[in-house]
């Protein structure tokens, strides 16, 4: 049975909580002087926009603007004002990186001029599960009493605040639908008008944006956005340069995640813009792929040797990656997360 500590990490994290504020401050070089919101040029007519620790992008063309991840209603409203003032051009496309509501929220302010595009798996992910929907296989690992819900005692004693926020009907038990609602969809997320499956190209004002599906990683509906002329990709939550990915926090898929990173390596670009932290380089994709592969290999071997989750968290140290931001926090969570993913996916270990 997984440890209570790890239940806590998962349940808190489904809320997109503020644990990562510290790393953001470090990664962004914030010393209290950074504005709450800002727009930063990446190269040419390509920009990042940020509020606190969340980052989206936009590309300006003569025929209008392409926005990637409106993020949330407050930031999207601010961005619209800024775009009107600075460029006087309409937003013609909104592209979603994935369906998590802390990146996909707020698009309604662009709805009168824009077409919204996302990966086809967003369609199902944006549907609220039925109130009696079964827990996902991984969630069933936490359900010690087997009642199909997660009680506070199955989460963690110190997760009271987070648990109460997730438990919107206040009955002391989290259903699949309540866990889903903390992370996916909801009233702030405007569904895509168009869905693509593997690859799509948008052209506007003589400029091009490519959408690449590289398989399952942080979610199963993730789009890597490639700006070919700017030699830049946007990878939101699943590839953060210089910081380990977070499997336990955001669910995720192994070993698919490793393969997805290898497919990103095969794309032609120089700059990575993540949805958190600072931009990075292509060499950091290779480092992430090695990290995830080493994690997968070590956890698989540990499971085959009959070790439990706590033993793996104590013994799989991945010291080659100790220079990465929040290494220790991410390592422990990722070993636990990888264990849970593999234990709830028959045939993967
Ligand atoms: Zn996400």
Image (cartoon, rainbow, N blue to C red):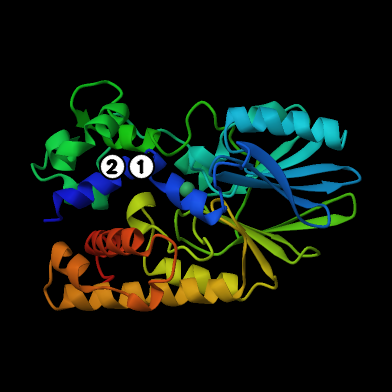
Quarter of the image holding residue 284? bottom right
Q: Is the C-beta separation of discs 2 and 1 under 8 Å?
A: yes
Under circle 1, the secondary element is: loop
Q: Position of residue 253 (x, y in %)?
A: 38, 61
Disc sitting over residue 11 in the figure: 2
**Front residue (pair 90, 276):** 276
Residue drawn at 45 percent across, 60 percent down: 217
On screen, residue 225 versus residue 182, left or right, reads right
On screen, residue 235 versus residue 78, left or right, reads left
Quarter of the image holding residue 151? top left
Dot 1, crowdedness within 10 Å: few (<14), some or many (≥20)? many
The residue beneath circle 1 is: 14
Q: Count numbered badges in the picture.
A: 2
Looking at the image, can residue 141 be seen?
yes
Residue drawn at 19 percent across, 73 percent down: 315
Q: Quadrant of the N terminus?
A: bottom left
Q: Position of residue 276 (x, y in %)?
A: 54, 51
Q: Quadrant of the C terminus?
A: bottom left
Q: Position of residue 179 (x, y in %)?
A: 32, 37
**Front residue (pair 333, 113):** 333
Q: Position of residue 9 (x, y in %)?
A: 27, 48
Looking at the image, can residue 16 be seen?
no
Residue drawn at 71 percent across, 43 percent down: 39
Residue drawn at 35 percent across, 51 percent down: 249
Disc sitting over residue 258 in the figure: none
Alpha carbons under labels 2 and 1: distance apart: 5 Å
């Amino acid at each position: 049975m997984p440890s209570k500590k790890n239940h806590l990490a998962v349940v808190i994290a489904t809320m997109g909580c503020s644990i990562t504020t510290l790393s953001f401050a470090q990664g962004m070089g914030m010393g209290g002087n950074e504005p709450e919101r800002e727009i930063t040029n990446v190269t040419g007519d390509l920009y990042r926009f940020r509020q606190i620790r969340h980052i989206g992008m936009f590309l300006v063309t003569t025929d209008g603007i392409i926005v990637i991840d409106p993020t949330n209603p407050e930031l999207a409203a601010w961005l619209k004002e800024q775009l009107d003032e600075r460029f006087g051009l309409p937003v013609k496309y909104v592209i979603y990186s994935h369906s998590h509501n802390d990146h996909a929220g707020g698009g309604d302010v662009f709805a009168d001029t824009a077409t919204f595009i996302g990966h086809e798996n967003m369609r199902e992910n944006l549907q609220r599960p039925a109130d009696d929907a079964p827990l996902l296989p991984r969630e069933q690992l936490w359900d010690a009493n087997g009642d199909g819900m997660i009680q506070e005692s199955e989460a963690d004693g110190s997760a009271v605040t987070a648990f109460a926020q997730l438990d919107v009907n206040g009955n002391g038990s989290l259903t699949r639908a309540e866990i889903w609602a903390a992370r996916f969809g909801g009233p702030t997320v405007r569904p895509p008008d168009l869905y693509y499956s593997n690859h799509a190209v948008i052209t506007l004002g003589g400029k091009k944006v490519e959408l690449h599906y590289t398989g399952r990683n942080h979610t199963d509906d993730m789009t890597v956005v490639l700006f070919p002329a700017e030699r830049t990709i946007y990878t939101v939550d699943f590839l953060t340069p210089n910081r380990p990915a977070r499997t336990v926090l955001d669910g995720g898929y192994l070993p698919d995640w490793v393969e997805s990173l290898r497919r990103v390596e095969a794309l032609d670009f120089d700059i990575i813009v993540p949805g958190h932290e600072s931009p990075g380089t292509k060499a950091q994709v290779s480092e992430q792929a090695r990290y995830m592969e080493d994690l997968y290999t070590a956890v698989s071997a540990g499971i085959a040797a009959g070790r439990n989750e706590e033993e793996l968290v104590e013994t799989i140290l991945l010291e080659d990656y100790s220079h990465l931001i929040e290494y220790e926090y991410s390592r422990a969570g990722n070993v636990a997360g990888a264990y849970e993913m593999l234990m709830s996916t028959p045939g993967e270990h």
